[in-house]
Image (cartoon, grey):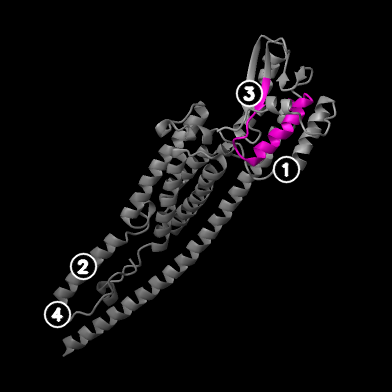
Amino acid sequence: MASREEQKRKLREQREAAEKAAAHTAELRKRTAYLAAGVGLIALIVVVSLVLVSQSGDDDKKVETTDVFAGIPQKDITLGDPDAPVTVIEFADLQCPFCRDFAVHDLPGIVKKYVKPGDVKMELRLLAFIGPDSSTGREVAAGAAEQSLIWPFAENVYNNQGTENSGYMTTDFLREQAEAASTLSGRSMRPGRPSRRSTRRATAGPEAGGLLDAVLRGDTRGRRDEGRRRRRVERRDRRRDLPSQGLMGGPRGLTLAIASLILIGIAVAGYLTYVHYADIDPVCAGGSGGCHTVQASDYAELVGIPVATIGLGGYIALAISLLIPGELGRAAGMALALIGAGFSLYLTYLELFVINAICQWCVASAVIMVLLAILTTLRMLRGPAPPEQTADTAGA
């Protein structure tokens, strides 16, 4: 009789301990969910800030115009001495960001070294392969060519270039650039439509991203069976939800998957960082040239820092977060991955709809970051293992 009462008492204590553990786990999960939501909100704010900073880089593209053509003969579309032995023809689209890079960074040196001394003369023939704004700009440029002002006009357009096909190349915008070209050259640009000859010469035609899994159950078959069941539950719980400490924060397989993705990401971002500083073209499968186009675009840098280098730092920070024990490490990893995934998706959007080129390495990094965002969020929501509650501790 006494043995039966003792057994009931133990079962009651076990039930109470299990209810207490379940309540603690529910409270812990609720707290973790709130924390994860806060981390997600912070990550969203950071991503939006990065996007705004990246877009403000368009303003950085607007550089102060200087008259690099001062003192050099200009007639129609020709810049330089008409009798120069070498003629260089530049084909360009006023909306093209690569044409802009050449005009801003390379052309002044060529003009100074070769055109100004009379060794080379240059001709500017405009294309309209990017969009309708290109045709509008090309037509106005033809009028500038008729007045021998196409070179300073084009330079002003490039120095104030906006995003392709965004509608920035309005009549007012083009008028401002024409007036600036007139001011620099010291000559007034006359209004009026260009002649067919000027239009023909200036254009080149159109071309063409462990809750407690098992709640302790009463067992009336004796202490031996009860001990076996308890040990099975403990082993299963340890396998499902290892204590959240350091590298083993969260389930083993989940953490190892995160670590593996981080290593791959470091390799990808490290390679693109090397490509940037070595000033070489990245290897692009199929020889599409998209990798070079993206890496050479204005969007390949953020506030003067290569995006690849920022990504490399992000992957390294994610690796460090795995070594931070407890909730702090999981929250840091989730925040970093969400920020990286959000910004990577924005960059993929730019590749598809603004740059019109795909970098396979960048897409691979974006996929890795999205997977890391999913896995680190799962790791955060699962949280640490609940406190060990067994029959032994309950009955102690």
Q: Which residue is mark 3?
A: 90
Q: Which residue is mark 1?
A: 170
x and y percent of residue 265 in the render?
42, 42
Q: Which residue is mark 2?
A: 231
User: Mark 2: few, some, or many residues within 10 Å (few <14, many ≥20)?
Assistant: few
Q: Earlier in the sequence, mark 4 or mark 2?
A: 4
Is the residue 15 above or below the residue 281 in the image? below
Give the residue furthest to the bottom: 1
Identify the residue at image location x=26%, y=77%.
395
For the N terminus, the quadrant is bottom left
| Picture disc at residue 221 | 4
The amino acid on which the numbered mark 2 sits, given as a three-letter code, is Arg
Identify the residue at image location x=52%, y=42%.
351
| Picture disc at residue 285 | none
Identify the residue at image location x=29%, y=80%.
15
User: Mark 1: few, some, or many residues within 10 Å (few <14, many ≥20)?
Assistant: few
The span shown in magenta is 123-151
Residue 109 or 369: which is nearer the viewer? 109
Disc 3 versus disc 1: distance between alpha carbons?
A: 24 Å
Helix, strand or loop at label 4? It is: loop
4 and 3 marks in contact (CB < 8 Å): no
Q: Earlier in the sequence, mark 4 or mark 3?
A: 3
The amino acid on which the numbered mark 3 sits, given as a three-letter code, is Glu
Residue 148, magenta (yes or no): yes
